[in-house]
Amino acid sequence: MRDLSGFVETRQQLLSLKPNHRMNWIGFAVAHHLNSNSSKAVEVLEAYEGTLEDDYPPENERYEHNEMLLYKISLFEECGMLDRALEEMQKKESKIVDKLSFKEQMASVLFKLGRFDESESIYRSLLFMNPDNYKYFIAVQKCLGLYSDNGQYSAADVERLSALYNSLKEKYAWSSAVKRIPLDFLEGEKFQEAADNYVRPLLTKGVPSLFSDLSPLYEHPGKANILEQLFLKLEDSIRDSGCFPGW
């Protein structure tokens, strides 16, 4: 069993012995965090920042300081202190060099504050940077109110989702995610058509993870049968003509 209270005491003793070492401050904060006291962890990090000069950090320590700032912001977010997290990000933006993590955290905080338009805008800019990141697509859906934890969508939502992914597909035609995610909400003939378009290039390339990728769809009523018929059709065509149907 972990003695987290003892860990906190040990880290405090180490900090008392060497208060000039950054890692002792961060270690003390992490100890409080692990001991389910995130607010105290924030206090420790702010106390550490109070010991620094205004022009800190030097060039060779910018990334380490950036990591500490992002950690503190995540603690604010974890504590539900979203306004403080946003204020801290705006105040310390120039000292945060990991701009990708900064954008992700900013989008997350804005979403939790209910500022969905601003959050969506950032997630769309992140999609431009990495259009194969499933998390960004799902985040855009959430910002638009088009995400369901149980995967059940109304006909109107499916129509809106289809329009969303059709527009995204025009921008990111090479993205695998933009083709795969619609398979989760499409049904019937539209699902079959989308699945056909999705699997053909991957079968041609011999991607071994294709069937693992599709396996979650087997839980959706009717989709397993559609996929079975699709693959049998493709197999028969390859056996008869050496190519996919219509090629």
Image (cartoon, rainbow, N blue to C red):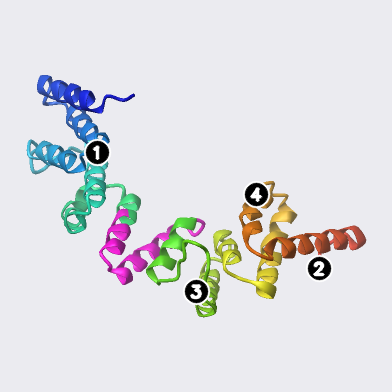
User: Mark 1 — residue?
Assistant: 36
The quadrant where residue 19 appears: top left
SS of the residue under disc 2: loop
Q: Nearer the viewer, mark 3 or mark 4?
A: 4
Give the magenta part as a residue range: 105-132
Tag 1 near tag 3, CB within 8 Å: no
Residue type for callout 3: Leu
Q: What residue is shown with label 2?
A: 247
Q: Residues within 10 Å of mark 1 (few under 14, many from 20)?
A: few
Residue at figure coordinates x 17%, y 53% from the top left? 88
Q: Which residue is mark 4?
A: 212
Mark before the other along the chain sequence, 1 or 2: 1
Q: Secondary structure at mark 1?
A: loop
Q: Position of residue 241 (x, y in %)?
A: 90, 63
Distance from disc 3 to disc 4, alpha carbons, whole Å, reads: 26 Å
The residue type indicated by label 1 comes to Ser
The answer for how far apart the CA atoms under marks 1 and 3 are is: 40 Å
Foreground disc of the pair 2, 4: 4
Give the residue number, with chain letter if any, for mark 3.
164
Q: Foreground: 176 or 36?
A: 36
The earlier-in-sequence mark between 3 and 4 is: 3
Q: Nearer the viewer, mark 1 or mark 2?
A: 1
- Dot in front, 3 or 2: 3
Inspect the image, locate mark 2, and give the three-letter code of the amino acid beneath it: Trp
Does the residue at mark 3 contact the one at mark 4 (Cβ under 8 Å)?
no
Contact flag, marks 2 and 4 (Cβ < 8 Å): no
Which amino acid type is shown beneath numbered disc 4? Answer: Ser
Residue 66 point in image, percent of width and height = 24, 43
**Is label 4 in a helix, a strand or a loop?**
helix
Q: In the picture shown, does residue 148 fall above or below 89?
A: below
Comes first in the chain, label 1 or label 3: 1
Q: Main secondary structure of the magenta part?
A: helix
